[in-house]
Image (cartoon, helix red, strand yellow):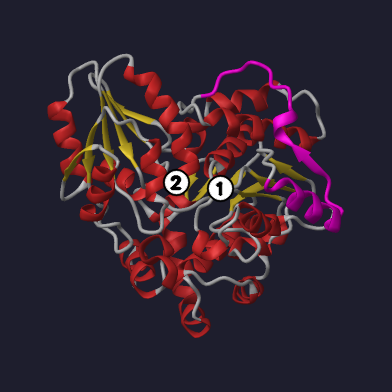
Amino acid sequence: MQTYGEVTQWLFSQTPVFQNQGATAYKPGLAKMQAFSARLGNPHQNYPSLHIAGTNGKGSTAHLLASSLQEMGYKVGLYTSPHLLDFSERIRVNGQVIAKEYVVDFVQEYHSFFLSEQLSFFEITVGMALAYFAQRQVDYAVIEVGLGGRLDATNIITPQLAVITNIGLDHTEFLGDSLAQIAYEKAGIIKENIPVVIGEIQKETLAVFKTQAKEKKAPLHFAEKTQLPEFPLDLMGSYQEKNKRTTYKALQVLFAEEELPQKAIDGFAKVIKNTGLRGRWELIDQHPEIVADVTHNTEGFKMVAQQLKEKKSEGELHLVLGFVKGKKMEAIFSLLPKNAHYYFCAPSIPRALAVEEVIIIAENHGLNARAFPSPANALEMARQVAKPKDFIYAGGSTFVVAEILS
């Protein structure tokens, strides 16, 4: 393995990748990650970090935090997953993706360790990120949880601040089938005496967070109680308002400041420019207006459905949708507008939900459904059918959006 392409291909093919394989790639537990970190010299101990968990919004919140910290003059490492177009998007410093040479050198140096210890793809990438941030001497690292929290590979860090955006019924096969059970898993990132910010107050999860915070003597803060001044945000989805409030509160707690400096506020209007964030209600064309959005679960679609209602007043709706297995399809479809044109597809990954299955559920909900072999085919048909004042929404899965953006 000499080139970046060869190295990333090996990572995708030789190690379990959850985004492609699902359950067979999920390796919960911290022992292997702790051993890997020790082998690397525990690089995460060289800089302060912020740890972000949650069912929805954790990626956007991580990018919002990174952008604000950058505007304040800090060098900021940002680790998120999954990527949309290229592996390197997962690891950034001040918005710049990880150097390809570093990826090649890292995999070559630790290749035998990966194999002997049977590390997962996610464990490898977390270790790579933590080591890269140390080499680049970042002032802060913003670390997004992969799945859950308590047993997630990122949970070897002791951050300066933990953030839990919200709790929803996603990944129930791993995290539990109730909001309280899932909250317990995500509350696993709460550490001794480390403040934690909760993005949404939910009656089913409140007691879990209070109990865990009390046990750990962790100061507990609720973003919903924060008075938010007016200032612009460059992320378009209406669901971003919650992430905006959560991020604002997190920065208040981090710096122990009631009123944030203007530079921090400026970061909210420069998230895309500063961090390269894509796929969040991203406008990719006009006349007709086309938006690509990675929303993929019931809680997310509650917000999307509301925004689609607002769009309908301007013209007809066209929805290009594909999904992966394990989502609450009946619940998602019950939220979608009946009087819209649907173009169903399946992303080209093993975890994709077959379009034939999607069509059956859609027809049971009385939706005007057509099947297409790929997201690109589905979007092309939507473009042909839609009038200039119509609105096209493409999403249902990160992988649908990735194929469309590519």
Looking at the picture, how far across and down is residue 175, in whole percent?
Answer: 57, 62
* The C terminus: image quadrant: top left
Seen at 26% across and 17% down, the residue is 315
Seen at 35% across and 55% down, the residue is 324
Q: In this figure, which residue is indicated by the disc labeled 1?
A: 168
Seen at 49% across and 26% down, the residue is 238
Residue lying furthest bottom in this view? 116
Q: Secondary structure at mark 1?
A: loop
- Let me know if residue 198 is in the magenta part: no
Region in magenta: 204-233
Q: Above or below — where is 87 with respect to 142?
A: below
The disc at residue 297 is 2
Amino acid type at image mark 2: Asn
Nearest the camera: 254 or 287?
A: 287
Task: Determine contact: label 2, label 1, CB under 8 Å.
Answer: yes
* The N terminus: image quadrant: bottom left
How far separated are the C-alphas under marks 2 and 1?
8 Å
